[in-house]
Amino acid sequence: MRSAYRFRLYPTEAQIKKLEDTLETCRQLYNDALAAKKEAWEDDRYNLTYYEMARQLSANRKKHQALKAVYAHVLQDVLRRVDKAFQNFFRRVKNGETPGYPRFKGRGWYKSFTYPDAGIGYKIEGSKLILSGIGAIRIFKHREIEGKIKTCTIKRDTTGAWYAIFSVDTEEEPPRVEPRTAVGVDVGLKNAVTLSTGETFSYPRYLVQMEKKLAAAQRRLSRKIKGSKNWIKQKLKVARIHRKIRNLRDEFLHQVSKKLVDKADLIIFENLNINNMVKNHNLAKHILDHSWGRLIQFTTYKAARAGKSVELVDSRYTSQRCSGCGILVPKTLKDRVHECPRCGLRLDRDLNAEWLLKVATASTLVEAR
């Protein structure tokens, strides 16, 4: 099983300069490799391979000091990224999907580089991460890494903070748990989560709480001259507010997903088409703030680690169908109460959907057994 560990780095000013220089060298190499592949295809319909680009890189590295200063395997990983981008492009073309041609990376759009070989070019010694060509950087290793480290990726976020992300392979798969208990999960806006057991979790709406502060910071940013020092400083302040909201939201989602995995062996979510739901501009902000897709993602990987399961069921009509008599009662997203004209059932729409999820949960648990 593959998992990832992310730790905060605290480089010195001199190390930040080396990290930024490495990022810039990797960005330029990415753009050069992309241009070479593009030119070879447009001129000769020839797909330049990774190995051909790697041989050219080896020759160029002897001539250019900037390339010499960067660890060779990091540069090779950049070429693999370019090659993978084209492989994905051709795969989407073949499958009839929207292809999305690989793009050149402008300044600020290339944010990470990778040491692809486990333990080669980097190592952890106590509270230091030693990177080839950069030095020993202080790392906040807040938990132990379980498993074999495969790669180490150094990443800079929008606020300028640096992180080390270790991709780890756990050799032994956790034993699968035979599902004996199941819970249905209905996500919503009034209550972030309503369980088939009747339990609810309310989301604190961190974006709404910080909306005024964020709007004020964005207004000040709009008044600055783009590219000026004051504009860069204000842009950083806006990014820090966004980071705080994101961190608070992720903490809430981690807590809820952990409780869901601890509660049952089988967790059932509605298979929502969130991309279509956010087309409603009146509710898009709140839907994105609740991050239902991220909750499902967190619950899925936590369940996999515990040997448990997550399933998605058809979400059609769970809010429209009456849990009492089964007829469809049309509602808009603004209608928060379910009122059935046939059987007279009247209750919160989330609770109505919860009763329907109980039925789906029970039937899925029977099938699993």
Image (spheres, rainbow, N blue to C red):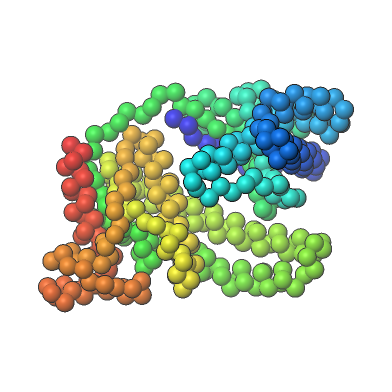
| Residue found at x 43% / y 62% | 276
Q: Quadrant of the N terminus?
A: top left
Where residue 57 sits, quadrant-wise, is top right
Give me the residue at 51% from left, 69% from top.
208
Q: Is residue 97 visible?
A: yes
Residue 140 picture location, percent across and down: 62, 39
Where is residue 251 shown, x and y percent of the image?
48, 52
Q: Compared to 259, does 83 lie above or below?
A: above
Q: How many marks?
A: 0
Q: Where is residue 265 in the image (x, y as percent from the top left)?
A: 27, 41
Residue located 80% across and 62% down the image: 227
Residue 128 visible here: no
Residue 40, relative to residue 171: is it above or below?
below
Left or right? Give the position of 90 relative to 361: right
- Name the residue nearer the viewer: 197 or 112: 112
Horizontal and vertical percent for residue 149? 56, 27
Q: Is residue 368 left or right of residue 87?
A: left
* Quadrant of the image occupied by residue 283: bottom left
Asked if residue 206 lies left or right of residue 78, the reply is left
Q: Which quarter of the figure is the C terminus placed in?
A: top left
Residue at x-position 24% and y-position 46%: 182
Left or right of 183 in this view: 109: right
Q: Which of 290 and 55 is in front in this view?
A: 55
